[in-house]
Amino acid sequence: MPWEADCLAPVETLLFSSELVKVGSFECAVDDPCFPTTESLDNDVFVLPQNPLWIRRNAGEYRFAEPGAILMHRAGSMLERRSMGRRGDRTYWFGVHPQLFVSTLQRHQLSTEDMGGALITDPKFRYRLALFLLRLQRQPLDRLTIEEEVLTLFFEICKRRARQEEKSHQAQRRRGSRQQRLIDRTRACLEAHLTESIGLETVAVEVGASLYHLCRVFREQTGLTMHAYRTRQRLGLVVDRLASGDHENLVDVAMDYGFASHSHFCRVFQKQLGMPPSALRTYGTP
C-alpha cells in the first residue's frame, strides 16, 4: 500500500514513516508564514495540539482546541488557525493509511467527511500519548512497535469518538450553534487562566453570559462543571511534564499548575489516574 510523497513544510519534522503509519511534528510561531493556513493536508491524520488555539477546517466555523484534545482530519483538508496569545501552534500528527483510516471510521459508524469537534482525552490517555512520543524521540524503536502503538491509539480514539458522537447526537436537539460557541469561548477562557484562581463571575463577564445560563449550558453539554474541566486540564499539563522524565519536585509541579497544596494535588491525581504522582517516575503506559 504505497503512500504519496510527503510535502513537509519548513516547520514540520517527520519522525517516522512506513507503509501503514507516519508520525511527525509541526511547530510554528504565530508570525511564521506557515501559521495562518495549511492549504491541503497530505495524509489522513489524528493530531495532538500542545498549545491552545482556534482551528477552522474547510471554511467552517472556528472551533477551540486545547492541549489534550485530539482532532481527526482527512487528506486534502484545508486548516486555518487563530492564535491564543503568542504561543503559536505546536502539534504532533499521526498519519494512518487512507484505506485503514476510512475502514476504521466506517466500522465505528463515523463520518468519513465531517470529523466534527475535538475529542478531549482523560489524563491517563494523555499520559500514554506523551510517553510514546517521548520514547519515539529519545530512543530507537523498531517498526513493529511504532506501528502497533499508533494503530492501537487510533483504534481507541475511534471508539471514544463514536461514544462522543452518540452523546452529541442526543444533545443536538438541545444545542444550537450559539450554545456551542459559548462552550468554546468558555473553554478558551478557562485555558487562558488555567493556573490562576479566578471566580465564576470573571468567566461569565469574559464570555458574555449570565451565571445561571453559563453554568447550566456548560455542564449540560460537556458533562463537567467548569471546575472539573479546569482540574482535568491542569492535571493534563502535569502528566505531560512528568512524562518528560525530568526529576522535578512534585510540590513545585503542583503549585506551578494552580493546585492549592501538595495534598490536594495528590488526592486529585490518585482519583483521576488511580495511582500516586510518584508512580509516574517509574510507571510505564497506564
Image: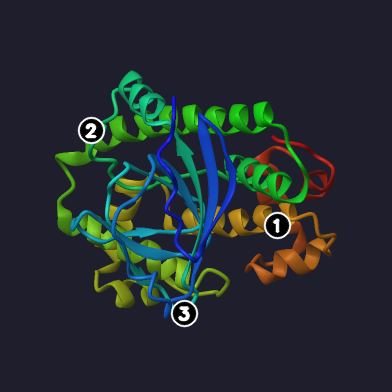
Q: Which residue is mark 2?
A: 170
Q: CA distance from mark 2 to mark 1?
A: 35 Å
| Residue beneath the point at 52% across and 34% down | 21
Name the quarter where the C terminus is drawn. top right
Q: Would you call the spot at circle 1 few (<14 residues within 10 Å), some (14-19), or many (20 or more)?
A: many
Vertical position of residue 96 compared to residue 208: above or below: above
Q: Quadrant of the N terminus?
A: top left
Residues under numbered marks 2 and 1 in contact, where contact means CB atoms less than 8 Å apart: no
The type of colouring in the image is: rainbow
Which element type, helix, strand or loop, lies under badge 1? helix
**Disc 2 or 3, which lies upstream in sequence?**
3
Which residue bears the numbered disc 3?
86
Secondary structure at badge 2 equals: helix
Residue plotted at (55% across, 75% down): 196
Q: Position of residue 50 (x, y in %)?
A: 53, 60
Disc 3 residue type? Answer: Arg
Q: CA distance from mark 1 to mark 3?
A: 29 Å
Q: Nearer the viewer, residue 78 or 122?
A: 78
- Residue on which the image places disc 1: 265
Q: CA distance from mark 2 to mark 3?
A: 37 Å
What residue type is disc 1 on?
Phe
Indicate which label's residue lies in the foreground, 1 or 3: 3
Mark before the other along the chain sequence, 2 or 1: 2
Residue sitting farthest toward the top:
107
The image shows residue 2 at horizontal and vertical percentages of 44, 29
Front residue of 144/104: it is: 144
Task: Please tell me which residue is depicted at 34% across the width and 19% down the height of the picture.
Answer: 107
